[in-house]
Amino acid sequence: MSVRYAWLRALARPTAAIGALVVGGWLVVAVLSHALAPFDPLHSMVPLMTPGAHGPGGTVFWLGTDALGRDVLSRLIYGARTVVVVATAATLTAYALGIVTGLLAGYFRGHVDIALSFITNVVLSFPVLVLYIVIIVALGASAANVVLAVTFGSAPAIFRIVRAITIDLRSRDFIAAAITQGESTWRILLVEILPNASGALVVDFCLRLGYSAITMGVLGFLGLGLPPPTPDWGGMVNEGRTMAFAFPHLVLFPCLAISSLVLGLSLLADGLRQPAGRVGRG
Amino acid sequence: MSEPPARAAQWLRTNDGSRLHPAVEPLARDALQHRTDRRSVLRVLSWLGVSIASARGVLGMPAAGAAAGPAPRRGGTLRFVCSVQQMTDPAATTWIEASNLFRNSVEFLTYVDSDNVTHPYLAESWHPSEDLETWDFKLRAGVRWSNGDPFTVEDVVFNIRRWIAPGSKSPNRTTFAAITAIEPLDELRFRLHLARPVCSLPEHLYAATCPILHRKFEEQGANWPRNPVGTGPFQLTDYHVGRLAVFKRRPGYWGQPAYLDEIRYLDLGTEIATHVAALAAGQVDLLYRLTISELDLVERFPEMQLLTEPSAQTLVMRMQQDKKPFDDIRVRKAVVLSADREQMLRFAYRNYGVLGEHHHVAPFHPDYFRLPPVKRDVESARRLLAQAGYPDGIDLTLALGNTQGRYEQDTGQILQQNCAEAGIRLSLQVVPAAQYWTIWDKVPFGMTYWGHRPLGVMVLELAYRSGSVWNESHFSNAKFDAALDHALGILDPHERSAAMGDAERILQEEAVMVQAYFPKKFTVAGAHVRDFRADPQDYYRMDKVWLA
Amino acid sequence: MSRRWFLRKAFGMLLTMLAVSFLVFTILELNVDDVAVKVLGQFSTADQRQAWLQENGYTAPFLLRYLRWLGAFVTGHWGTSTYYREDVLTLIAPRLAASGLLAGAALLVIVPVGLLMGVIAGVREGSVVDRLVSVFAIVTTSIPEFASAVFLTALFVFWLGWLPGVSTMADGFHLRELVLPVGVLTLYSAGYIARITRSSMAEVMQSPYIRTARLKGNPLRRVIMRHALPNALITPVTVIMLQIPWLLSGVIVVEVFFAYQGFGTLLYQAALNTDIYLIEACTMVSVVVVVLTQVASDLMYAWLNPRMSFGSSGRAAGSG
Amino acid sequence: MGYASPPGVWDGGRRVLDTAPILSVEGLTVALPKGADRSLAVDNVSLELRRGEILCIVGESGSGKSALSGAIMGAPAPGLKVVGGSVRLQETELTGLSERAWRRIRGNRIAMIFQEPMAALNPVMPVGQQIMEVFELHATMSPAERRERALNLIRSMQLPDPERILRSYPHQLSGGQCQRVIIAMALAMNPEVLIADEPTTALDVTTQAQVLELIRELRTIQGHAILFITHDFGVVAEIADRIAVMRNGRIVEIGEARQVLTQPRHDYTRELIAAVPSLAPPSGDASVSAATGSEKKTVLAVTALAKDYGRVRAVNEITFDLERGTTLAVVGESGCGKSSLARLIVRLTEPTSGRVEVNGKCFLTLEGSERRASCRAVQMIFQDPFGSLNPLRTAGATIARAAMLAGVDRRSARALASELFDRVGLPREGLDRRPSAFSGGQKQRIGIARALAMNPDVLIADESLSALDASSQAQILDLLRKLQKELGLAILMITHDLRVAAQISHRIAVMQAGRIVEIGPAGRVINSPEHPYTRELLHSAPGRGLV
């Protein structure tokens, strides 16, 4: 069965199926946030209503309202859009950076490899949060800076994965064949090596998306995330934390949201890992 | 009190036995005939050196603070959660928390109680000249510094000269700009010469930045925590910024010794919910600050004493008139007109507070003058914007630092929603608290927290007089300064509030700021903490506090 | 694998630290007058700042300043913090000890729990236990630290009231205050360790030498203890070593949430206050920790895995 | 280590010690898990084994021979289950035993020798300790006595410096030495039955010969009963007393070695024997005429080619010529540098010194586009069929791409691909399928088609047959011969198997430690080798009995 069918067959596996369902669900919520959200997430109505309370004009605050009287459910829905957009953007930029450097280092080895690996090592040994804060305090909090910060955090890890795969594939005979047949280096990298690495990379992409979502949550939690009033899960936890004792709904629902998204992504990654990564037993 | 007013005046005495100031007798008569409220008259009399006991007798007011309760227990350590801030020179310290720390060890010439009545402190007595331009003070005898030196007029002269010196970084330079010279008369007496009459001078001497430091303070490095010499009831033993400060009771204090053995100030960071949790777990006894978001948490613990106090503290969202686009008054007016004060108070502070009127003077300030009510008018805001050349709206940025708590950011977000209705696209630039204090007077449109001041005039003096050290809005208006000087010179509270009206009106017309509400002040104490009274200015004297 | 390997490792380590120090110094002290404002406060006048810059040698060329700073750093003069007004070294020491205590306590729980789960799941691959451990691992590593902190606090502080909500150690050390932070750390990383141990154990159980051990007549328990474990624990142990840097500077969220005065909060506060000298010192300390643990984990790997051991007694004359 | 027994067919002169069988297996049946290609791994197998006898079980992979050995040891591979029949070791019936009882038998009364010697030993435990463990399990001995017994065992395995071997880790020993340690471990408790599961498959020729010699002595001198499992009929011919041929879990033929080898009754046995390429070069036109063809044109000339890896000189001053339409086989054991030589010629690795000329033009100094244009002349096919093709591209696309690189336009490249598919004997519809849909042999054919797409003058085959089973090897050899005749291809065949070299090459070069020790016409090198190393190679080649 060719590789394409492998994906479909994998998705049938329970872990991947649940993961795909959860992630798909949040994706739909993010895309259709305008339609799904019962209220305008930025509009203050009645402060600190408990979940299920009735709002003005027969409406119901299913998940209650926050300190500023904004509907928590609507902010969760729009928060999904923020997370999906920003986390994906960050992960894609990190991937672009990681793949290019990883391929070059893995294929050419020698000085290129030593230099790039050293830079990665330096960035990895830098305390990640100081990196985030320095970037954000220096440039000010905005979606672009969060993307930059998250990219800086994930690119080294992606570099290492791509480099390892490239080194392994480079020793395979079909690359030697391509070289002896006069294939150009760029074609070998992009047509022969990268597609074969895609299996493992897709698995890591799912995990990396999860880490980016967590990082955004942490930044929001520490008050370094997106500027108010952007609905952002981490920010919601940060805002609601002080009143959590009396109004747990302010923090529980955003935490459940982010955990479920990341769990979905991890399950998806784990489910997809079988056909692409580990050689079947026996 | 049926005593005929004329004869009543004769019962009044001054602390130093000097002749009564001519204004005293008419003021007492007005109070007795109920033409002005007796509390504000008592306050003015205390300025003029009249002994409070005699004044209360004449005006028929009960002796203040005759606490009947159980006898206070001596001893014990009080753990006070309060941020321990970076501080070297008390005269230039901007934060109230820091002033509360050194307040235990260094004292003031006068003491203003929570009813705004000025009492003798290091100055035993004082009396002003008729034209209120010369003030004679007599210091308390037998007071010793913690390093053994005697407390003399030399110390006071060193301090006052230091405040009003041209290079001084202390806000006192503006507050006491009127003082032209200080003339020591003898070991314990000195005279102050003023350029213009300032009736409330004794009350100003109790401002947070006016403690009397030892005369060799600057010679010994001008770093008080490192060389904590003081005349007060406690002695500072160790001071670590951001962590801990410890004061122990000092033997040989001139006054009545404090009840507590030791006060430990613990800096538990900016998360106030953490402080409440620590209080609930019995790890601490007293919190310095509680904001609206922790209120519901505290209500869950009935044994905790929730102390609340109306306060003139407020959030000032001011626009710098010398920076684009705020140099155009129509833009400023549009912002002020679109602000919905009720909504801000309701959502950001859950109605625990009093509405402001965009001029920083609180309704309960004695010298407040009621102006016609402020109405929100989005339509005219939109029209003004169009006239100013922004037909399809304008992009503005409000910088804030949540220095006192999350309600600052919430207030900002309500303003954001309000402005949106008028076509103003307001974005919030939230910076870490410490970071905000480095840019608070530089950002064109910023939200700054201002602490309580007993008098409206004190606030306007500090924040809006041209060239004042803390004039963050770079507001400079000759008519306003004149109105302020005029108000400062008037003794009679009734007349003074009329003069204040002009100053308030100018601030409103010039649309200097959006100042929506005066949030109530909360603090909370453990069950066993006794006689700790919340003070509107947050000036906590700890020597009367004891632990049951 | 020999002394040459160790020298090359040490050189790499040194170079990494130098590179990071240069990066940190450039980010924070390239712009000179920012430094002056930070140190003298926003009320200092321009000429005061200029005088201070002059006096502290900030007018020298950038590279010279960097070398001077590096020299000072190596000899222990880390400067005074602009926010705390205290010597940086005396600030960092107690905080490092606090975080070390938290990290130690966390490791004491994470390592046995993680390894035990991993081994049991690895031995009985495909069994119910294995599936349970995998699900536990995936779920716990997917919940961000601040979310699990919220959940645990809601459960143990707000609802059951068994534990204090805060670990400020305000009046002395209380073990009860460590329980929740360690709980959150364990939840987050025990699952990760279990997963790695499980896959390593499962792989080893399939290898030929385990079949040899069984066919020699070893009972299953002995096969696991004498043959499987020594091979299977090599990777997890090195991964555990790499958790140490995370436990020191990475757990800022947990320390901030519980107001635990550790190294993480100090780093966070320093960064918020852009407290230049403190950030430089904290960054260098965490880099040193990262690099040292990397070397330690390599040494541990070589020690556990004779194939990599250096200085072994030469190779028998085998065919190439 | 001399050669005790003379070469030649083993005439079965063994001494049978006693008639009663040590091990008797009746109707043993082992079930495969659901979803396997057949229901039973072992189907109603019966056999007997006596002391002092080697019973060889031979069959292709998947015939169930390993499942049988596992069942006899009471430890079938995961998923397999013994569902019937009995296994009796002298008087004890094994099939029903409890796990505890089985443990007293494994390693004590029945011991096993494994296929992958390096992997069968615990990498983190010294080998001596692994031997002594057997004594711990099955005997009560003091540690010093255990150590002494282990040393004696190592000494009896003719291993150098037993003290150091005792302390060494497996990665510090060679494949051969590890296998001797495993045999020592098996002999520790002097078991009644020894099961050897493909013990020499992973070893190279000379080491394989020594181990087989060792096992033969175990049978004749110490009278062990040995069950020898292998897929290589050459080894069977070398060592077996009796032979059982297995196919799909059933024994299709069992009998005395001489009778099964010379007059096999079952045609499957005949097929297996025929598939073993014989050592004698084929007579007839192939080898002789091409060499003396009229236009003798040298297509490849290699002079003094050398390559250093640090201080080691892997390829040392190699010089040879290759004429059009002829095949030169480079033979040598693993590590002699033959693969490095191939990679140097196609410049996958840059040589340290020496010249390579293709059709008279110097090949090594070309750079950039000129180099890419000229590399058409020399093409390579590789050893590992699974790694030689890009798994994501269809066979047709891979071949067409090669053609395009040689300058053919896209449309005609597609046509050339399908034409080459026919030429290498692959079904047309396979063009659009991915490599994973093909067998090992078919993948090599695609590799060949890809090489031919560039119309090369020289084809280098680097161990291209070693990963295939006997029948596929034979087919590929025929294909290469046919292509050589039709296209006049020059072939450089790199192999470790003398038989393969004998079957295809006109001339043979023998390499040892980076140097060519002997080169000449195939017939001459095989029948009257001049260099002692060549003689040793020829002598060690198993299955001489089949000549």
Image (cartoon, coloured by chain):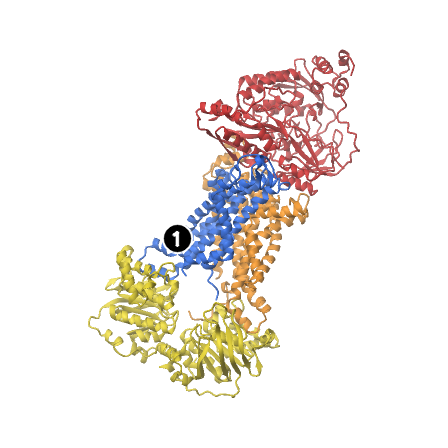
Chain colours: A blue, B red, C orange, D yellow
- Residue D10: x percent and y percent? 41, 85
Instruction: Give the answer, above or below, for where B153 lies relative to A80.
Output: above
Instruction: Give the answer, above or below, for where A209 lies relative to B13.
Output: below
Q: Amino acid at mark 1?
A: Leu
Residue for point 65% across, 13% down: B131
Residue for point 22% across, 74% down: D292
Q: For residue D126, say whether it is visible.
A: no
Along the line of sight, which residue is nearer the eye, C214 or A255? A255
Along the line of sight, which residue is nearer the eye, C112 or A35? A35
- Residue D353: x percent and y percent? 31, 63
Q: Tell me: B426 left or right of B349.
A: left
What count of labels does the image hold? 1
Q: For residue C152, say whether it is visible.
A: yes
Q: Classify mark 1: helix, strand or loop.
A: helix
Q: Disc 1 is attached to a residue of which chain?
A: A
- Residue B182: x percent and y percent? 64, 19
Along the line of sight, which residue is nearer the eye, D60 or B82? D60
Per the image, the residue denoted by label 1 is A104
